[in-house]
Every structure is written in structure tokens, then in C-alpha cells.
Image (cartoon, rainbow, N blue to C red):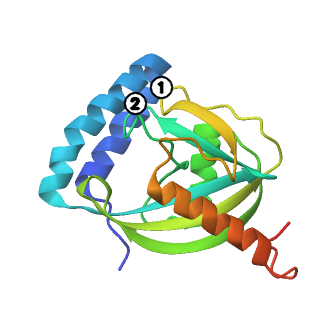
């Protein structure tokens, strides 16, 4: 049986599509913040099941961290986003990285799947290490407040625990990948 989109997801997608066509980036940023604040109590009550993807975006010995405009704004986080029902996690990740950062992906390594409980949602989180062609990024003004490259060994204060763990895992995968699996350099 195909997965059915929750009503709240369909509503949010419809509103976002309309806003993207007519709103300025500043208006869209304000809408994301307001929407996030409005949805948190709804998520608390309904405890929706969602699927998301996060990526350790790396170029050489550096990783790209972001500060979002709407959630945990004081925390350095990994880029990513939600998967649409029936959407492949790798394709969703490519879509999100293109929408939020405009980066050119040259390689993806699967880091695993884990349960997560952010903002009262029951989430399955697909995690990846993503190698990019260059450090050039075009952050979405509406979703990304700041995007910066950091040396893997010197993550900034305010980096979340999950982010630190996944960066360490991506480093481990980088150095232990077999040459024939396409996951290494």
C-alpha cells in the first residue's frame, strides 16, 4: 500500500508553493518561522511519522554547516530536509541540497538510518556523507540564515551533538571505505 501524505504535510506544501511564487525571500523567511511555531503544537498533539535526510557535506577536510532561519537558529546543523512520500532518500537529498545550497554533488556515501524525535515528530532519518565539487554555495535566503565551511577537526561552538556525531562518522567512512565501493576519495 503506498504511503499517504499526512494532511498537515499536504497543506504545508500547498502554502509553500504559493508563497514561493509570490513572496520575497524576507517574506518567505517570516512565513517559515511563523509556520514552524504554529506547527510545533500540532506535532506535539499528533506525533506525526516523517522521513528526513541529513548530509555531512564535505570538500576535502572541511564540512559545510548551516544555521536555519526557523528552527534551532542558534545551532550549527547539517543541511537536509523532509522526504515526500514514495521519494527515494538520495533523490530527496539531492533536491534539498540544490534548493537550500545550490551545491554540485559529486559523490554520496550512505552513513545509515536512525530514528529521531525532533520537535515531537517520530522521524526516520537517512544520513549521508556528500562530497561536492567546490566550496561555492548559494544559500536559500528563506531557509538558511548562514552557511559556512569549517575544518572537520575544529567544529564551532554551538554545533549540535547529532551534527558532531555524523561529522565524525563521515570521517570514519572516508578513511575506511574500500576502493571498489565508490564511497571513498
Neighbor class of circle 1 (other Cα within 10 Å; few <14, some 14-19, many 20+) is few
x and y percentages locating residue 39 in the rendered image? 23, 43
Quadrant where the C terminus sits is bottom right
Of all residues shown, which one is farthest toward the left? 45
Secondary element at tag 1? helix
Residue 143 visible: yes
The residue wearing badge 1 is 21
Can you tell which quarter of the image residue 48 is in? bottom left
Left or right: residue 115 compared with residue 135: left
Element class at badge 2: helix
Towards the viewer: 34 or 159: 159
Assign the N terminus to one quadrant of the image: bottom left
Residue 23 screen position, x and y as percent: 43, 19
Q: Position of residue 32 (x, y in %)?
A: 36, 32
| Residue ID at (67%, 52%) | 57
Q: Is residue 183 visible?
A: no
Lateral position of residue 89 relative to residue 41, left or right: right
Q: Is residue 10 above or below residue 53?
A: above
- Assess whether mark 2 and mark 1 are in contact (beta carbons under 8 angstroms): yes
Residue 50 shows which numbered tag?
Answer: none
- Total numbered labels: 2
- Which is more toward the observer, 168 or 125? 168
Determine whether 117 is above or below 157 in the image: below
Q: Which residue is mark 2?
A: 18
Would you call the spot at circle 2 few (<14 residues within 10 Å), some (14-19), or many (20 or more)? few
Q: Quadrant of residue 29?
A: top left
Of 178 and 5, nearer the camera is: 178
Residue lying at 48% horizontally and 28% vertically, measured from the top left = 142
Horizontal arrangement in the rendering, residue 55 relative to residue 131 (left or right): left
Give how far apart the Cα atoms at labels 1 and 2 are. 5 Å
Q: Position of residue 62 (x, y in %)?
A: 74, 48
Residue at image point 50% right, 46% down: 159
Amino acid at each position: 500500500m503506498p504511503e499517504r501524505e499526512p494532511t498537515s504535510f499536504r497543506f504545508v506544501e500547498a502554502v509553500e508553493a504559493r508563497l514561493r511564487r509570490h513572496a520575497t525571500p524576507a517574506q518567505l523567511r517570516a512565513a517559515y518561522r511563523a509556520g514552524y511555531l504554529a506547527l510545533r503544537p500540532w506535532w506535539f498533539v499528533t506525533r506525526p511519522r516523517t522521513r528526513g535526510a541529513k548530509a555531512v557535506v564535505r570538500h576535502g577536510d572541511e564540512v559545510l554547516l548551516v544555521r536555519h532561519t526557523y528552527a534551532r537558529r542558534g545551532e550549527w546543523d547539517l543541511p537536509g530536509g523532509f522526504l515526500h512520500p514514495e521519494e527515494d532518500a538520495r533523490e530527496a537529498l539531492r533536491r534539498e541540497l540544490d534548493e537550500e545550497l545550490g551545491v554540485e554533488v559529486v559523490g554520496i556515501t550512505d552513513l545509515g538510518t536512525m530514528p529521531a524525535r525532533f520537535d515531537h515528530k517520530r522521524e526516520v532519518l537517512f544520513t549521508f556523507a556528500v562530497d561536492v565539487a567546490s566550496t561555492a554555495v548559494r544559500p536559500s535566503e528563506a531557509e538558511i540564515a548562514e552557511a559556512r565551511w569549517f575544518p572537520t577537526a575544529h567544529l564551532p561552538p554551538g554545533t549540535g551533538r547529532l551534527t558532531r556525531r555524523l561529522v565524525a562518522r563521515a570521517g570514519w567512512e572516508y578513511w575506511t571505505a574500500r576502493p571498489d565501493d565508490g564511497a571513498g576519495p
